[in-house]
Image (cartoon, rainbow, N blue to C red):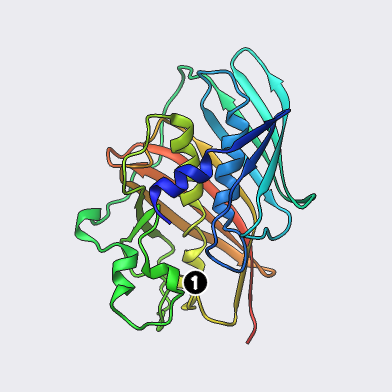
Amino acid sequence: MDVPRLQDLLDLAEPGGDRFLGRTQPLPAQRLFGGLLLAQSIAAAGRTVPEGRPVHSMHGLFVRAAVPTDLVEYSVERIRDGGATSARRVIARQDGAEVFSATVSFQRAREGLRHQAHCPPATSPEDLLPLHERFAASDVPVPEWWRRPRAIELRHVDDPPYPPPVRATEASRHLVWMRAPEKLPDDPLLHACALAYASDMTLLEPVFLLHGVDRHATDVRLASLDHAMWFHDDLRADEWLLYDQDCPVAGGGRVLGRGAVFDRAGRQVATVAQEGLLSLSR
């Protein structure tokens, strides 16, 4: 899937009554990619918000697996429009069944205290290979869609948790550069949606690196439970962003991923958290 296709997926149809229809992508084939639900939910909510209020947070719950071949209907409830903030509740359905729900908040910019985490040192993206180029000329056992260029380009600073052998490491930090490799329109909502889409790609990878497990092994079962994002500053998803990820805890069949997103200037533009179900059928 290329960048124009991602833009097309984020351009929702609007039948009326704060209802929106989102097209889907065929890969991965087994279920709809969760990042698309995140991105389209923000896009739907943003269509109902007064101008000048960028998105600042999203809290989503994955209810059941969505089918990658059917349209998704998004219903938006206007919870509140205050003097500076707006809140929306979004329900995503397929064939009448709820597959995802989210609360999305928007706020006009205000002055206040500022501080942030330090941006970690990392090899520049220009000195790293795109993920699809790592596998394009090899016969390593990864899903075929990892060998293709995609709407979000990934460049891992360290080795990804695929293909085997994956060596266990004590390092909990996992750094990945990401961007849309083609210029996007100057629409802040579109860039936030593109980052939401990208944020679901690698966030749980640190657990596989910590335990030396191949992400794509046949005995691995992974499913997202929830996903939260906070947008701290303006950003461009078509410029390089460094995704600093870690896994602070895993247990009870669940794993928690955290991420901080920095631009090339070192500004922290977003924070991400996600919990997933993880099982190994050994």
- x and y percentages locating residue 168 in the rendered image: 43, 77
Q: Where is residue 2 in the image (x, y as percent from the top left)?
A: 39, 53
Question: Above or below — where is 253 with respect to 47?
Answer: below
In which quadrant is the C terminus drawn? bottom right
The image quadrant of residue 222 is bottom right
Q: In which quarter of the image is residue 140?
A: bottom left
Report how many numbered discs are placed on residues in the image: 1
Answer with left or right where residue 149 lies relative to residue 142. Answer: left
On the question of residue 248 being in view, the answer is yes
Q: Nearer the viewer, residue 192 or 27?
A: 27
Residue 271 makes an appearance in the image: no
SS at circle 1? helix
Furthest-bottom residue in view? 282
**Could you tell me the amino acid type at mark 1?**
Phe
- Residue 84 image-quadrant placement: top right
Residue extending furthest left? 127
Q: Looking at the image, which residue is at 40% across and 41% down?
A: 117
Q: In this view, does 22 lie above or below 208?
A: above
Name the spot of residue 99 as percent of width and height, x first.
72, 52
**Which residue does the image show at 35% across and 36% down from the upper left?**
267
User: Residue 80 in the image: x percent, y percent?
Assistant: 71, 22
| Quadrant for the N terminus in the image | bottom left
Q: Is residue 27 left or right of residue 267?
A: right
Query: Mark 1: few, some, or many residues within 10 Å (few <14, many ≥20)?
Result: many
The residue at the far top in this view is 83
Q: In this figure, which residue is indicated by the disc labeled 1?
A: 208
Question: On the rendered structure, is 273 left or right of 140?
Answer: right
Above or below, comparing residue 155 to residue 80 in the picture: below
